Image (spheres, rainbow, N blue to C red):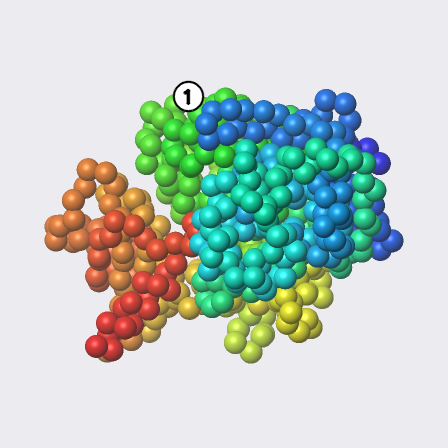
Amino acid sequence: MSSALPADAPVAGASIPDYAQFYAEFSADSIAAELSGNLQSGINACVECCDRHATPGRIALLWEGKDGRSASYTFAQLKELSGRFANFLKQQGVQPGDRVAGLLPRTPELLVAILGTWRAGAVYQPLFTAFGSKSIEYRVAASEAKLIVTDADNRHKLEEVLDCPPIMTVAAAPPAGDFGFWPELEQQPSEFAPVMRKADDAFIMLFTSGTTGPAKGVAVPLRAMLAFYVYTRYAMDVRPQDAFWNIADPGWAYGLYYCVTGPMLMGHAITFYEGSFTVESTYRIIDKYKITNLAGSPTAYRLLIAGGAEAAGPVKGQLRAVSSAGEPLNPEVNRWFRQHLDCLINDHYGQTETGMVLCNHHGLRHEVHMGSAGLAMPGYRLAVLDDDRNELGVGQPGVLAVDVRNSPVFWFQGYWRQDAVDDDYYITGDTVETNQDGSISFIGRGDDIITSSGYRIGPFDVESALLEHAAVMEAAVVGKPDPDRTELVKAFVVLSTGYQASAELVAELQQYVKHRLAAHSYPREIEFLTELPKTPSGKLQRFILRNQEIAKAKI
């Protein structure tokens, strides 16, 4: 099997396939045929994402460290290093199906650990580097991880982890009792026959962000690679000529699925930047590596907007495709990117449990409506349901669901150590509505919807309107309990530089939203904050603000 992209992959200047036709003719078998292994008889994720692309000189990773150092790694180099890591795991008694956790920043060692774990037939479990010891302890205990790979900067967090598994540390002088990453690899042979696994065997173990309760484990099976491939190729539209960078952290689903797995599955080089996300560093990396295809979150893009048009100037016109995921994309962000970077951001929706399922596809031709999350990704059928699981029509708000019976690349089977899901629909819990053209617009999480004087108000629309105002850097909108209206709309606002909180500004923002949306939708209360509560991956936690207002109402 060739390691190159298929001959019909989109290339510069080529016609883009029509979405409707491609969706109707989609075949999961045709995607599976692109793999070198077989999902039924035997497959290995390291082979699919590394070995089969290991032709002489083919670059797999472009890395830049936080100290300014940089390096590139070929697929052939990573194949050798993954073999050494797999031999180490075998020496330590790690068996196929066992979990290996990585508490690492975006470094070459992270990629070696991921690929080596897969090569051994084991399951890679990311630990976000912003986690404290309690979050780490919960996850490694729940997954029964056999090893944690970390670095010197994060090693201290493991001192407080009860029943901590063995530790391998990337450091010049690893602590006593730890395995040293590079010294151990140097002692191992580079040859290691990949362990073949089956379609339903896990290769990734993730935990949900825990915004609505304790984090739940999600074991991602090997057949999910089909869905990752479709998203990378047709939604993000990663092309052979692209310089690709997904700025999402591989400690979470969007980064691990689509910064690492999807692009490498296609034999495409990925970019790791170890340093902190700033306006300066992001534009510098885009310019230095001539990035043409970028993926990230609206939170990151709003910070770029804060840098102003002057900062964006040097890379204007360079970005061909920009993808957004993690939270709804505010129309104002898209307008700014069109004006100052000469590119379109396409909004995409997904969950840890599903991967991306609802997209404005860069690589398929269809009309993109501002404010719409797009159309079902090929291989998925989506539905909007009422409380009785009846499918709803155009313009009727309901919960977004995946029709499991008619979604051949859907892979989620249930949470770790819980009963398997056996249902016709997977319920996302998020409220949406279908538009006339079949696209779907996001309204809000089911528990975020505000009911005020009989109106159902989605916080996203109010937040989007607020963000259009120059004074507003970030905004979060929740329903505050109210005896007359059931709830009233309350906004929490982080101001842009140069603006001061005042009663006059409150009135100005209220009138602005009333004008942009409707009289019943404007925030009757506005509170100014220095920052909004977010998960470590940058997702807004409206429930914290909402719960605060509920608690105040009970006093």
Q: How many marks?
A: 1
The percent coordinates of residue 46 (x first, y second) are 74, 42
Between 70 and 154, the one lying in front of the other is: 154
Above or below, 77 relative to 94: above
Residue lying furthest front in this view? 176
Q: Is residue 22 left or right of residue 135?
A: right
Between 354 and 334, the one lying in front of the other is: 354
Residue at x 63%, y 61% (from the top left corner): 144
Q: The N terminus lies in which quarter of the figure?
A: top right
Disc 1 packing (10 Å; few <14; some 14–19; many ≥20) = some
Label 1 belongs to which residue?
Answer: 314
Q: Quadrant of residue 299?
A: top left
Residue at x 27%, y 56% (from the top left corner): 492
State the SS at label 1: helix
Residue at x 31%, y 48% (from the top left corner): 474
Residue at x 73%, y 57% (from the top left corner): 97
The percent coordinates of residue 208 (x first, y second) are 53, 60
Above or below, 239 relative to 127: above
The percent coordinates of residue 305 (x first, y second) are 36, 36
The percent coordinates of residue 413 (x first, y second) are 68, 65
Give the residue type at disc 1.
Pro
**Can the viewer see residue 112 in this picture?**
yes
Q: The C terminus lies in which quarter of the figure?
A: bottom left
**Can the viewer see residue 319 in this picture?**
no
Q: Quadrant of residue 526?
A: bottom left
